[in-house]
Amino acid sequence: MVQKAKILLVDDRPENLLALEAILSALDQTLVRASSGEEALKALLTEDFAVILLDVQMPGMDGFETAAHIKRRERTRDIPIIFLTAINHGPHHTFRGYAAGAVDYISKPFDPWVLRAKVSVFVDLHMKNMQLREQALLLRRELEGGQPGDGDRTAGGLLPELSARLAAVEEQAEVLTKELSESGAGTAVSTAAHLERKLSGLRRALDALQPGAVERDTVESQPG
């Protein structure tokens, strides 16, 4: 069963939350409501989110302050934040949003299709990261559980399966990076590139564990 990504919707007005749910329901992911910055921070203590849609104008803790708290936490600092605002005070106001850590800044009323497309990009990136962590965990468990002399069993059992799964993730990440590059979404492109670097590292680790890897490295390092 494929695990769904969680999307955090933060707005003090119930009608706005309802509208966001209607727009994003087509993505078929788990939508979590928060009616204040404090409620959002509480949800972030225990849940992992693919992206946060954060209203700027809220009573008490506004969107900028909420974002600052999110970015200060080790657990949540890398979660993408899309600011939503009903007002536009010009470039300075927008700059303040990006300075607070937002990956995008959208003024209301917004185009539902555009918002849905932007959110789907970060959901896709989150799912690729989840798959990558799963492959790394499987590999770590196999290595930690192995006994002396089990190298052939490991390579002949789990490694080929991990390699095939990783190849599928690599292919999907390559397609996603190409789409993001063509769209010009700078922050998303940077995130995708970071994912590809992680994939490359895991691929090198897997290749090093393949039977004969040590022997091949030794032969290649010999003078010609």
Image (cartoon, grey):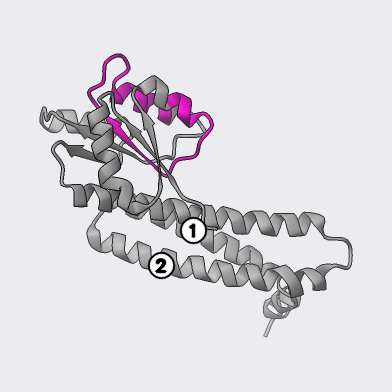
Please tell me whether mark 1 or mark 2 is closer to you in this view.
2
Q: Position of residue 2 (x, y in %)?
A: 51, 57
User: Range of the magenta residues?
Assistant: 41-70
Q: Nearer the viewer, residue 5 or 204?
A: 5
Q: CA distance from mark 1 to mark 2?
A: 11 Å
Q: Is residue 3 above or below residue 83?
A: below
Residue 150 has which mark? none
- Residue under numbered circle 2: 174
Q: Nearer the viewer, residue 34 or 45?
A: 34
Q: Residue at x 18, y 33 (%)?
A: 94
Dot 1: few (<14), some (14–19), or many (≥20) neighbours within 10 Å? few
Q: Position of residue 180 (x, y in %)?
A: 30, 59
- Does the rendering let one see residue 51? yes
Q: Amino acid at mark 2?
A: Glu
What is the quadrant of residue 12 in the picture?
A: top left
* Mark 1, secondary structure of its residue: helix
Q: For the C terminus, give its image quadrant.
A: bottom right
What is the quadrant of residue 32 in the picture?
A: top left
Q: Position of residue 54 (x, y in %)?
A: 30, 32
- State which tag comes first along the sequence, 1 or 2: 2
Q: Amino acid at mark 1?
A: Arg
- Residue under numbered circle 1: 197
What is the quadrant of residue 218 in the picture?
A: bottom right
Q: Residue at x 29, y 28 (%)?
A: 11
Q: Nearer the viewer, residue 43 or 210?
A: 43
